[in-house]
Image: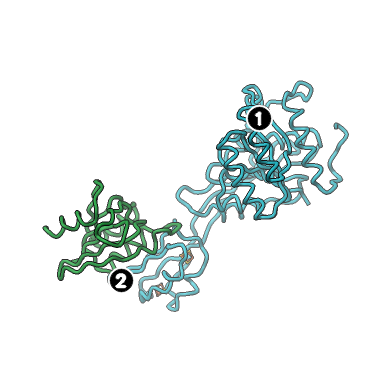
Chain colours: A green, B cyan
Amino acid sequence: MKTVITAAGNNVSAAFDKRFGRAAWFCVYDHANGALAFEKNDFADAQGGAGTKVSELMVEWGVGKVISGDFGPKAKDLLDRFKVQMVVVEEDATVETLLERIKKQ
Amino acid sequence: MAFKIAVVSGKGGTGKTTVSVSLSNYFQRLWGAAVHLVDCDVEEPNTALFFPEKNMRSVAPVYQEIPETDLERCTFCRECSTYCSYNAIVVLPSVKFAQVDPNLCHSCGACLHACKEDALHLYQKQVGELRHYKVGATLKISEAELTIGSAMQTFLIRELKKTIGGDSDLIIYDAPPGMSCSVVATLSDVDLVLVVAEPTPFGVHDMCLTLDLLKELDLPHGVVVNKAGMGNDQIYEVLERYQTPVFGRIPFNRDFAHAYAQGLLSSLDDDPMLKWFRRILFEIERRMPAYERVDHSER
Ligand code: SF4
Ligand code: SF4
């Protein structure tokens, strides 16, 4: 399974970005082999529809869980529908802190 | 052909609508002109509210055409989704899912062009309503109201403008507040733009953004300083720097505000707003080609 953490930058010391559709980067962690990748969000500055398009990406990447601060209603609908688990984190943190947390699970 | 004036302001609350309503009032009374007042603020039309005595002439729904995915035919190739610049289409090949979000779709037609499988079919969705009114013999009012959730503001404004005939002497477009695409849609093909600005620091800042836009669009324009005397004189320095003419000033006074809000200026003799608007009308007239039907006898 893969888990995505929405990130403000492209490395683990970057801040956790609480916006789902408009996060700058996605930190993709693969539980199967421990691989870590950072993907740029091309929809971060989209006029509209960022949440839906990013949800589409999540499903296509085979992501099982997304950690973010705020999922819009449209993103929620899609992610729910395709059984992508949404974890809402409200505290300020770095990507690393959250990563350590999910690795333990 | 009617002379078309747009009344704009960089932000809400500058008195743009009261200025539009007052102008339509004075054009009729001082020039004997037939006026068509058009409210282009489709998200919150409020101009018609100033005229309780209006008669409704017609109401008509406006539709947009939205594609819907036929899942029987769709091969989930994602072509349509790549073509859609509005991010309105989601296609998930892995789970055989495809969907168009009607609230994001701008009816541009690109996806229909992209789909080689004939898997997209159009249906009609209401985006708003057009309403036309008449007030007495010389005033027409038109407005459009956007369906909640729709993103088709500019489309609706263009549809509204298409229904405005040229049989009046003057058309006044009351623009939406701000600087959005809706404002640009309102301004297309107008002859003169009136910028309503407040002499406060925020007001000046927003006015400058509007003036920059008007310069870019290359539209003749001038400024009406509303609530004059309320802030400071910075606005006049800025206007000088921009080389933008001041069409007039309207002093800040609660009673005046009340007077126009009421729309009850029955006699020109004791109308406290008259002298301020005479000046504005004069500045507008100087920028108009000659109009035969305009009756100047009262001036
Ligand atoms: S018509 Fe245009 S905006 Fe609407 S879904 Fe198709 S490509 Fe997107
Ligand atoms: S282009 Fe046509 S076939 Fe391809 S995903 Fe879109 S609707 Fe389906």
**B173 or A58: nearer the eye?**
A58
Q: Amino acid at mark 1?
A: Ala
The residue at which mark 1 appears reads as: B228
Residue A17: x and y in percent read: 30, 53
**A27 or B74: nearer the eye?**
A27
Residue B75: x and y in percent read: 36, 76
Mark 1: give few (<14), some (14-19) or many (20+) Cα within 10 Å: many
**B111 or B139: nearer the eye?**
B111
Outermost residue toward the right in this view: B297
The quadrant of the rendered image in which ligand 2 is seen is bottom left
The residue at which mark 2 appears reads as: B96
Name the chain under label 1.
Answer: B
Mark 2: give few (<14), some (14-19) or many (20+) Cα within 10 Å: few
Q: Are marks 1 and 2 in contact (CB under 8 Å)?
A: no
Label 1 and label 2: CA atoms lie apart by 62 Å
Query: Of the residues under marks 1 and 2, which one precedes in the sequence?
Result: 2
- Please identify the quarter of the rendering in which residue B104 is found: bottom left
